[in-house]
Every structure is written in C-alpha cells, then in structure tokens.
Amino acid sequence: GFRLFHADIEKKLSDRKRLESELSMMIANESFEIWMQPILDSKTGKLFSLEVLSRWFHPVLGAIPPITFIALAESTRKIALFDRAVIRKASAALSQLRKNYPELKVCINIAAATLIEDDVCEYISAMLIEHALPKNVMLFEITETMLATDKSRLETNINCLRAIGVQFLIDDFGTGYSSLSRLSDLSLDYVKIDKEFLKSLNTGDNHICNTIIKLAHSLDMEVIAEGVETETQHQRLINLGCNYVQGFKFAKPMNEALLAEYLDTLTKKMLVKRVD
Ligand code: C2E
Ligand code: MG
Ligand code: MG
C-alpha cells in the first residue's frame, strides 16, 4: 500500500509538541498574567466583582488566546496545575487590591478536572488563609456541561467549598447542557448569560434573556450578563431585571496597571476608598 506524507503533518506535530512543552514551562514558571474584567451592578454601576482572565504572551508567537492554551492544558492534563497557579496569583492580587478597595471580590474560571481533585477544597481554603482573605470574596465560574461530569466528586467538592463560604456561578449559561433538576439540586449562587444571547437584544428580541433571568430568579440565583457592548443591551437587561453586567461597553479585561487606573477613576465616582 501507499501512504502519502506531507511535510505539513510533521511540522504541525512538532509545533504542537513544542507548544506543549512550552506550556509546561509556562505553568511551572508561572510566566502568565492574570487580567481582570469588572462586573458591575446593572442599575447603580457599583463594582460587584472582577473576573480573572488569564493571558499567555509567548516570546515568539505573541499572545496565545486562552481558548487555545486552556484547551491544550486540558487535553494534556495540565489544567489542574494551571488553575491552581491562577488561584494562587489571584489570591495574592486580591489581597493587595483589598488594602485600598476592601469590598473587592474575584470570579475565577475553574475547569472540571481541577474541581474534581480530592484536595481542591483544602487547597482553596489554604490559599484564602495564606492571603488573609475572607471566604466570601472568591467565586468560581463553572460551566453547565461540568455539572454532568463525575457528579459525586464534583458535588462533594462544591458542597465543601460552599460550606466555607465560597460561591459558584454557572458560566456561558444556555450554551452547554445540564438538566434543570440538577441545576435546582445544586442551588448555586449566580447564572451568567452567554454573550451569544445578548446579540438578539439589539434587534428587540428579548425572549431568551427574559427566560434565563426568570428561570434563575425562580431558583434564587442572581444573574450576570456577559458581553454587553451596547447601550440598548444594557437598558433592555435592566428592564428584564438582570442583576449585573459585564462587557466591553463598561471595561475590557485589564492588566495590573490599567486596572489600578480604572479602580482609581471608579473610586472617585462611587467606591469608598480607604484612606488611613
Ligand atoms: P469566559 O469565562 O466565558 O470569559 C468571557 C470571555 O468573553 C473572555 O474571553 C472575555 O475577554 C470576553 N468578553 C468579555 N466581554 C466581552 C464583550 O463585551 N464582547 C466580546 N466579544 N467578548 C467579551 P477570553 O479572555 O479570551 O477567555 C476565553 C475563555 O477562556 C473564558 O471564557 C474561559 O472559559 C477561559 N479562561 C480564561 N482564563 C481562564 C483561566 O484562568 N482558567 C480557566 N480554566 N479558563 C480560563
Ligand atoms: Mg468566565
Ligand atoms: Mg462566559
């Protein structure tokens, strides 16, 4: 028989191998950055929390999008190590920020593989203690699809973390799958509407956002809308009773320096800054 071989295939494989080993180094050296994007009260504009979004600036390839390196970390089983490094960095950053802004909280994306680890509850608890953080300042963003994986371990860990005051949010709601009974059994704290569903608000179609907000409220969960880019979307979300908003209309994800500037400006408007 014959097999055709393209030099391209070899190149793709060796590129992937190289990226895999660079990812391992990036995680080990913690040479990634955590950027943060504000989540605001939809009516008052008061800061509710900051979502931690990781950034990898590769010395040769430039910025590698999170969906690419997170997927690679998941497929090579390095995601739990990465997520733990994010939690450690976010705890340290939050602890610093709270010196000036004592009300700040963070929302951290966490993968299923990280959340089913045996000692994840102890790890997060230890991070909070090490950085002198109260327990109710950390929220974890999980996806609906995660609720369908390794149910018992996931549930044990979620319950353990909730018992110490850590909160949970369902990210990208409506794009994955989970049964409604599971959603109500777990009784998590917040639902985040995926940005895809916000597009129709611009054309006057409120149906999906309205349904998600009603469903979440009836299950005693508050709602965050992600990907708000226009004034029309913002106004319609307020009218539908959406509690919090996040998106480029208000602020993009920011590095440490830009965030400091943003918080300073916002403080002058509304946050009570500690002056001692
Ligand atoms: P996500 O958690 O759903 O994050 C929201 C994404 O939407 C972010 O993309 C954010 O930059 C983007 N976004 C926010 N507002 C707007 C807007 O108004 N318009 C548009 N077009 N986009 C907006 P990003 O930073 O590229 O992150 C992509 C995904 O990568 C995240 O989706 C999350 O699933 C994952 N991710 C990022 N950082 C981490 C991390 O530290 N750990 C884990 N496990 N996953 C992460
Ligand atoms: Mg998220
Ligand atoms: Mg999302």
Image: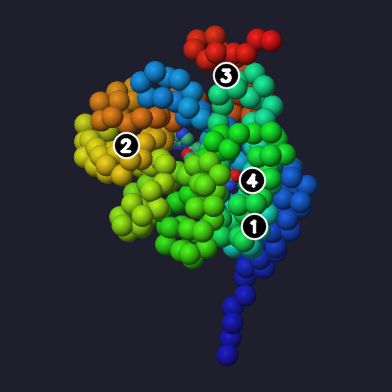
Q: Which quadrant of the structure image shows residue 235? A: top left
- First of labels 4, 3 by sequence position: 4
Please, what is the three-letter code of the amino acid marked with disc 2? Lys
Establish if 85 lies above or below 137.
below
Tell me the SS state at disc 3.
helix
Please, what is the three-letter code of the amino acid marked with disc 3? Tyr
Please, what is the three-letter code of the amino acid marked with disc 4? Ser
Question: Label 1, on which residue?
Answer: 119
Residue pictured at 38% horizontal, 48% vertical: 187
Establish if 219 lies above or below 260.
below
User: Whole-Å distance between the Cαs marked 2 and 3?
Assistant: 27 Å
- First of labels 2, 3 by sequence position: 2
Which of labels 4 and 3 is toward the front? 4
Question: Label 2, on which residue?
Answer: 199
Which of labels 2 and 4 is toward the front? 4
Q: Label 3: few (<14), some or many (≥20) within 10 Å?
A: some
Question: Label 3, on which residue?
Answer: 262
Question: Label 4, on which residue?
Answer: 125
Residues tagged 2 and 3 counted as in contact (Cβ below 8 A): no
Is there any visible trace of residue 261 in the rendered image? yes
Q: Nearer the viewer, residue 227 or 104?
A: 104
Q: Label 4: few (<14), some or many (≥20) within 10 Å?
A: some
Left or right relative to 35: residue 208: left
Q: Nearer the viewer, residue 187 or 245?
A: 187
Left or right relative to 209: residue 101: right
Tell me the SS state at disc 1.
loop
